Amino acid sequence: MDWGMKNRMAKLIRPESARAVWLAMDHGYFLGPVSRLERPGETVRPLLPYADAIMLTRGVLRNCINAQNSPPIILRVSGGNSIVGEDLSREAITTSLKEAIRLNVSAVALSIYVGARYEHQTLLGLANLINEAQDFGIPVLAVTAVGKELGKRDARYLSLACRIAAELGAQMIKTYYCDDFEKVAGSCPVPLVIAGGPKLKTELDALELAYDALQKGAVGVDMGRNIWQSHNSLAMIQAIRHIVHQKASVEEARELFDSIKKK
Ligand code: R5P
């Protein structure tokens, strides 16, 4: 692996633990101002010291994140769809690599929609992005998106989508947790992180999700709503970090969560 690529990857997947805690805050690119992300800068500012990286669009990066005090950036470079549009899978590249380099990002990210109407367009988009990003030593994170079809998230489908992304050359993949997740991780030759998905009932549920994913082969999380939609987001991100980097049990993470919450 080239030095630049290796250096960027090491910022994202911490060499000390070979694991990663990323804070996803790119939701607005197709969902608009989701709850608690109406003012993204204010919501995430206290959480940034605990994130190994943040995932977001250039618009939110430029307007809401301090350039002098920022974690490494995973820049979402795909979009062109919306939650009220005709088909969420109709997504393409929106942000150039020149812009990504100008913003000094550590990785670029785009969604693929395997099995959807615009599957071909998104897979070629991934392949082309990898071809270009390789020249500059920038890793590509492929996101296995399912749009509104959340029921698609089973091991058979996610193994297919993750493996295709890896075969096309993605350096890292973001996917969902599911039953038999070890099958997804076990058939994917590059590091996998999991999204949190919609806010779960309790913080404990999200801690269990992160713990189970790591036990079954994920290298970390790229979590959004289950962190910043929590009323105790600061406690939540630290508890997740405890599981990911310190290999804490769910019980140990819950104790940390409770003690920070009390303060
Ligand atoms: C969705 O396409 C976005 O990429 C989000 O970053 C992703 O779903 C992770 O956020 P959450 O943990 O809220 O699901």
Image (spheres, rainbow, N blue to C red):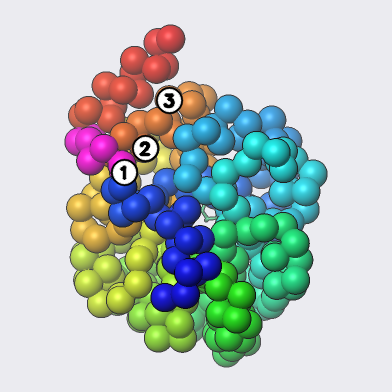
> What residue type is disc 2 on?
Arg
Q: Which residue is mark 1?
A: 244
Q: Does residue 197 appear in this view?
A: no
Q: Which percent across, then down, holds residue 168?
A: 46, 86
Cβ atoms under marks 1 and 2 closer than 8 Å: yes
Q: Which percent across, then down, holds residue 137?
A: 55, 73
Separation (CA) of disc 2 from disc 3: 10 Å
Considering every residue shown, the one lying at the far top of the view is: 263
Q: Which percent across, then down, holds residue 123?
A: 55, 85
Q: In the figure, is residue 117 to the left or right of 155?
A: right
Question: Relative to the observer, which residue lies in front, 16 or 156?
Answer: 16
Q: Which residue is mark 3?
A: 235
> Which region is colored magenta?
244-250
User: Which of pointers 1 and 3 lies earlier in the amino acid sequence?
Assistant: 3
Figure quadrant of residue 48 = top right
User: Which of pointers 2 and 3 lies earlier in the amino acid sequence?
Assistant: 3
Figure quadrant of residue 175 = bottom left
